[in-house]
Amino acid sequence: MSINLEKGGRINLSKEAPGLKNAGIGLGWDINATDTGAAFDLDASVFMLGANAKIPSEKYFVFYNNKESPDSSVIHLGDSRTGEGFGDDETVTIDLTKVDPTVQEIVFVVTIHEAESRRQNFGQVRNAFIRIYDTTTNTEVTKYDLDEDFSRETAVEFGRLYKKDGEWRFQAVGQGYNAGLQSFVDKYV
């Protein structure tokens, strides 16, 4: 049975999903009808951070132009340019047994491509969520529905996996930013 999290909520994956090795991270959203004159393109990005809260090298920044981490543990399955359809819009798979031991945290961020020039923000997005499921059994472990109104924000940190006492845990973050993807790159590099 899946555990629904609220903003700030946490789950110990080792206890709630013992034996979880291959996790799917599904990220989804719907776009409200708008008159910005341009299509929406939301992008999921993953930052694999060491104990210093920085990526060990640029290859640990996984996104539509770098779809696989150097340890082959994190794979981005591709960019959905429209977000149309039911279910996950973008998916990242993680083999928790392959994650480089120096990586202590894995951050999931969604940004709006060219948000400023297209006059777009997360206030025009609804039904956003992040979920974790076991890719072997296709069983959902946890889900976080982002119910907040991000009326000016152009980027949102959906959630993060982190290691504590040798166990993988997940935190539902839901923190909005009035920034683009480059600001996260600057923060974590």
Image (cartoon, rainbow, N blue to C red):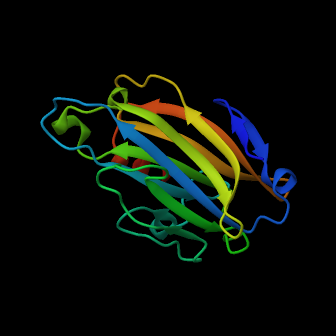
- Front residue of 66/103: it is 66
Q: Is residue 157 left or right of residue 38?
A: right
Residue 19 position, x and y percent, is: 83, 66
The residue at 65%/53% (across/down) is 132
Number of marks? 0
Instruction: Establish if 94 lies above or below 82.
Output: below
Q: Quadrant of residue 8?
A: top right
Q: Is residue 113 left or right of residue 144?
A: left
- Residue furthest to the left in view is 37
Task: Please report the residue visible at 66 percent of the width from the left and 57 percent of the height from the top.
Answer: 133
In percent of width and height, residue 74 lies at 56, 68
Left or right: residue 91 compared with residue 160: left
34 shown above or below 91: above
Give x and y (percent) for residue 45: 45, 55
Q: Residue at x 40, y 65 (%)?
A: 78
Report whether residue 187 is seen: no
Q: Residue furthest front?
A: 86
Percent from the top left, x then y, of residue 46? 50, 56
**Does residue 6 appear in the picture of this structure?**
yes
Residue depicted at x 71% and y 33%: 9
Name above or below for residue 58 compared with residue 8: below
Q: Is the residue 27 above or below the residue 103 in the image?
A: above
Would you say 188 lies left or right of 120 here?
Answer: right
